[in-house]
Image: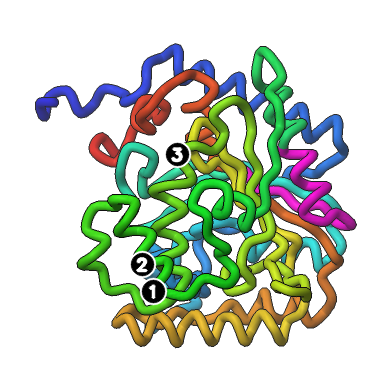
Amino acid sequence: MTQSDTWRPSASLGMIRARAEMLSRIREFFRQAGVLEVESPVCSRYGVTDPAIDSFAARYTGPGAAQGLDLFLQTSPEFPMKRLLAAGSGPIYQLCKVFRNGELGRRHNPEFSLLEWYRPGYDHHWLMEEVADLINRLVETPLPVEKLTYGEAFEQTLGLNPHLAGIDPLRRCAIEQGISGAGELIIDHRDGWLDLLLSHLIEPGLGENGMTFLYDYPASQAALARVRGGTPAVAERFELYLSGMEIANGFHELTDGREQRRRFVEDNRRRRESGRPVIPMDESLLAALAAGMPACAGVALGIDRLLMFLTGCNDIRQVLAFDISRA
């Protein structure tokens, strides 16, 4: 690509029309379901503490902030949407741009589009059904739905119990399965090895013939989900895969503000230990949880990846009007 070509769109005009049609049908789906479309700020004074996500930072200078105000571009509209839920909004959805630093590749662009929605009174099982319903409204022929627990996926593919296996068996499995560089990797926590095995050996086979929902993750991977006690305890969350590609990530949402604060503190401890910046906790979200957010389930769905699936594309640049190289 020459400098003189960078003005041209990444996507074809036909793809731009396909995106517009998909968004129109998504909005109609939620209109019929009685779910309210909302908007929330793209910039916030609070960031995301998740150690796996890096935010873009911005700075406001002007009236009301004589010394300047540090802001973060949203990585998800989740936190302000939960504040709306606590204020009594009822079921809501949002279509928006989100931003994640350090993410670029065949399925990643630092700026991308997200569909996020929340259903008071739902758990993650009910929400999986609605996600499947939405996808089948967008495809020409309804897709079969497969549901696997996280444990079943590991046991069927690798013969491992991911809830019980220690670091050494997980590391041996990665080496025996031929994951490049696994023998030299230094990963000092189980979740790192589980993520490596999942992404390299299990995910590519998920959603080959329809939709595959992976659910009930290890409790240590709860993030913003409830943890269900038992042996083992599990996080009530799910991910949707189509053609080996993660499309959506959903939770039976945590509503306990004290537990959420504990998780934020733990996230920042892990960030500090890895030499990454500590992120200010979203005190507005914590106040909303303390005030009383209704029991609900929520999901974030990648619009660009969904469009890739619907149109048979294998590179996210093919579905973006302007990818980062042309921004």
In the rendered image, residue 254, in percent from the top left (x then y), is placed at 73, 71
Please name which of the two marks, 3 or 1, marks the residue nearer to the observer: 1
- The answer to whether residue 21 is above or below residue 152 is above
Name the residue type under label 3: Pro
Of the image marks 3 and 1, the number of the one nearer the N terminus: 1
Residue at position x 62%, y 87% in the image: 262
Residue 39: tell me if it is visible.
no
Name the residue type under label 1: Asp
* Badge number at residue 204: 3
Magenta stretch, residue numbers = 115-131
Give the residue pinned by disc 1: 168
Residue at position x 75%, y 44% in the image: 128
Frontmost residue, 227 versus 162? 162
Frontmost residue, 63 versus 267? 267
Verify whether residue 125 appears in magenta. Answer: yes
In the rendered image, residue 77, in percent from the top left (x then y), is placed at 60, 57
Q: How is the image coloured?
A: rainbow
Tell me which corner region of the image, top left, top right, bottom left or bottom right, holds residue 272.
bottom left
The CA span between labels 2 and 1 is 5 Å
In-image side of 156 versus 7 (left or right): right
* Badge number at residue 171: 2
In the rendered image, residue 24, in percent from the top left (x then y), is placed at 66, 24
Residue at position x 82%, y 60% in the image: 296
Residue 153: tell me if it is visible.
yes
In the rendered image, residue 138, in percent from the top left (x then y), is placed at 67, 22
Frontmost residue, 130 versus 85? 130
- The answer to whether residue 264 is above or below residue 165 is below
The quarter of the image holding the N terminus is top left
User: For the residue carrying disc 2, how many other residues have a C-alpha within 10 Å: few (<14), some (14-19), or many (20+)?
Assistant: many
